[in-house]
Structures are given as structure tokens and as C-alpha cells.
Amino acid sequence: MRIIIVNDYAEMSQRAARIVASHVILKPNSSIGLATGSTPLGMYNALIDLYNQEYIDFSKVTTFNLDEYYGLGSANPQSYHYYMYNNFFKHINIGMANVNIPYGMCKSIEDECNRYEEKIEEVGGIDLQVLGIGRNGHIGFNEPDIKFEAKTHMVNLDEDTINANSRFFKSIEEVPRKAISMGIKTIMRARKILLLAVGKDKAKVIYQMLYGKITPELPASILQLHPDVTMIFDKEAASLLESMKNIEAKEFSI
Ligand SMILES: N[C@@H]1[C@@H](O)[C@H](O)[C@@H](COP(=O)(O)O)O[C@@H]1O
């Protein structure tokens, strides 16, 4: 696992964008797994800049988002469809037919989850999956649980997640209680994973994810088993790693 510690959010966003861009340059028809939340916003902006400077072409890229709130349609400003379109897709030359996000207004959850898995299979799997991490260790919307949920599935959101994400809604009552998320196996089958985290409130979960036991109670801990993971943290998110391990190097492997 490759860990990169950077000074701040801007540097993390630039490094992350370059990693995604290098995939698209080397393999123009890459399939890229995408994340939402505040963390990857700077990366999306940096990718838009690279696109505007004509360094990258997204016309053959396929994307798969990790998750979507159940019950929110794409016109809802809180939906991840809306987020992705406005923060990224409308600024680049990706074909909207190549964009995949679980559909929050689906009639049958089971059919939607199966359709999503089949679609990922159809393109030969995900080349690079971008991840954020929740304060409780969730990846996508895979919440702490007694077992790892393998495939795309319906999730009951944790109180902690509802609280954390309420900042995007007018009131906490408006935060959906359910979501559709790629499963842990879906994520783990991505050939490469890039996880991003910033800020002091992620420091504890970052330490636990890397040095704690592998457990569904901290879903991101499963990444210890993935053969090709890069993680980029700012100094604050990495603060417990630095003090506990007395790490001076800014880039290291574990
Ligand atoms: N479903 C998303 C996750 O994919 C994301 O990683 C997490 C962290 O969000 P943030 O980056 O805003 O801390 O929030 C949401 O719950």
C-alpha cells in the first residue's frame, strides 16, 4: 500500500487528479469508479482544468459511482446524480451514456442492484476506484456491520452518517435514511484503489483503517487486503500516523 502525505487539500486534489489522468491517458477507455462527498471536489476541479488544457480526453471513459441516496431523483440537488453532473460531468466531454450511478428512484431495488453489477461486469470491471472515507470507516455507503456486504445493495444509513451528511441538507429530517451502494466485493475487485482523506476528524479512522484489525465494523479496514491501493492524506488526517510512527518520509509503503 502506498501512502502519500501532502501539506493540504489543494495538494491532495492535484496529486489525485494526476493519478486519475494518467489512467485515462494510458487507457482511454478506462472504467473509473467515482466518489462523492466534499473530499473529491478539488480533484474533480483539477481534472476539469486538465481537460480544459487538453491533456485528457474523457470521450471513451466509463464511470461508475459508488452510491446514491434511495428516493432521490437526479433533479434533486442533494442527489449524487446532481452532484456528479454539476461538479464534474457537465464540464468535460464524457458521453452521458457512459456514466453509471445507482438509480435512487428505481422500482425494484433488487433489479437495480443486479443491473449495476452486470454493467460493471460488462465493461470488464473497474480499473481505478476513487474512495473517500466516512468518520465511522464507511466506504461508499458500506456502514459498519457484523458482516461485509459483497455486492451492490440497499443500505440503512448510520446515525453518524446521517449527522455528518446533514450539512448538505436544509435539516437533518431531510437526509434520506437509505441508500444504494456498491458492496465491499465490488469495490475490492477494482484493479486499483485511490483513497483520499483530509482533516482532523478523519485522523482516528485513518489510523484504525491502516493498523487496526480487518473487520466489517470498520469497513475500510478491508483495504489492507487489496493488492494495489494508494492513499493520499493531508497532514491533519495523517496526524496520528505521524505522531505514533514518528514518520518523517512523506511517501511510504506499508
Ligand atoms: N457516500 C459518501 C462517501 O462515499 C464519502 O466518502 C463520505 C465522506 O464524505 P466527505 O468526503 O464529505 O467527508 O460521505 C458520503 O457518505
Image: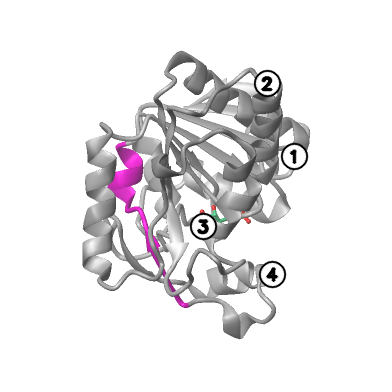
Q: Residue at x 24, y 54 (%)?
A: 115
Q: Residue at x 54, y 68 (%)?
A: 161
- Residue 16 lies, in percent from the top left, at 61, 30
The residues bearing labels 1 and 4 have C-alpha atoms spaced at a distance of: 19 Å
Instruction: Work out whether mark 4 precedes mark 2 in sequence or the reverse, and give the earlier one.
Output: 4
Instruction: Work out whether mark 3 precedes mark 1 in sequence or the reverse, and give the earlier one.
Output: 1
> Which quadrant does ligand 1 occupy?
bottom right
The numbered mark at residue 249 is 2
Look at the numbered disc 4 and say if its residue's Cβ is closer than 8 Å to ligand 1.
no
Q: Are marks 4 and 2 in contact (CB under 8 Å)?
A: no
Instruction: Work out whether mark 3 precedes mark 4 in sequence or the reverse, and give the earlier one.
Output: 3
Numbered disc in front, either 3 or 1: 3
Instruction: Work out whether mark 2 precedes mark 3 in sequence or the reverse, and give the earlier one.
Output: 3
Disc 4 designates what residue?
167
In the depicted view, which residue is nearer to us: 122 or 186?
Answer: 122
Residue type at the position of mark 2: Ala
Q: Is 188 included in the stretch rendered in magenta?
A: yes
Q: Which residues fall within the magenta stretch?
A: 177-189
Q: Secondary structure at mark 2?
A: loop
Disc 3 designates what residue?
81
The numbered mark at residue 9 is 1
The residues bearing labels 3 and 1 have C-alpha atoms spaced at a distance of: 24 Å
Q: Are marks 3 and 1 in contact (CB under 8 Å)?
A: no
Residue type at the position of mark 3: His
Q: Are marks 2 and 1 in contact (CB under 8 Å)?
A: no
